[in-house]
Amino acid sequence: MGSKNKLKRFKENETFQNVFQPTREEVVSNSFPLKGKWNSDFFKNDNPIIVELGCGKGEYSIGLAERNPNANYIGIDIKGARFWRGAKTAVESGMNNVAFVRTQIELIHHIFDAHEIDEIWITFPDPQIKYKRTKHRMTNSQFLKLYKNILKPDGVVNLKTDSEFMHGYTLGLLHGEGHEVLYSNHNIYKNEGAPTEVTEIQTFYEKQYLEINKAITYIRFKIK
């Protein structure tokens, strides 16, 4: 994507009422105004809040929000030029149950209050295979603690990935730490039983993986 195009998207993001782009200082100083008030001040209802981490173009946030009008969805990504697509789709379609925040995932406890979130989706994260990159792996112990903090006590996490490594690593960690694996499938399009929102909503990259017959995996779990 050219820098001209990126600038255009950044500018357009600023006009969208469903996009929030706080500065890092604002976030870490806990002065982000919607923390603990997403339901009351933005969505203006008591519906459950579902967060997509690393939302990319926002396909999952939008797809889920279309299916479930009685739930609220928030996509998180540091790349605003990417989620511009999802934000624009939501604005054009008049969807009032979806929002996007431009921030780093390790700062989400400054964006959401303790137990404010009902569910988390992690879709096609970078598996960070190299050992030195373990700290950036989105299902490592540190991240799970972060998620547990913002999730309600019975909240769930969904991981959908094309990486067998990420799938195996996460399953091993969940079992090793005594978390509750609710469902696991190492090839959702070959093995029956995956929830419809897992097979019927497909991201841009997922379609490319399927064209080369790459297995897509899925885990649904609770953090103990």
Image: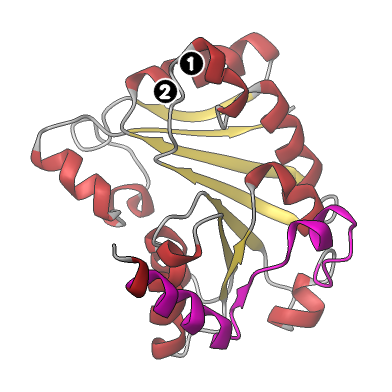
Q: Does the magenta run of residues contain 79?
A: no
Q: Secondary structure at mark 2?
A: helix
Q: Which residue is mark 1?
A: 169
Q: Quadrant of the N terminus?
A: bottom left
Q: CA distance from mark 1 to mark 2?
A: 6 Å
Res. 143 visible in picture: yes
The quadrant where residue 173 appears:
top right
Residue 223 on image: x %, y %: 69, 30
**Which residue type does callout 1 highlight?**
Tyr
**Residue 154: x, y in percent?**
73, 43
The quarter of the displayed image where residue 30 is located: bottom right
Q: How many marks?
A: 2
Q: Residue at x 75, y 27 (%)?
A: 224
Which element is circle 1 on? Answer: helix
User: Horizontal and vertical percent for residue 205?
Assistant: 26, 48
Q: Which mark is residue 52?
A: none
Residues 89 and 198: in front is: 89
Above or below 197: residue 106: above
> Which stretch did the figure color magenta?
5-34
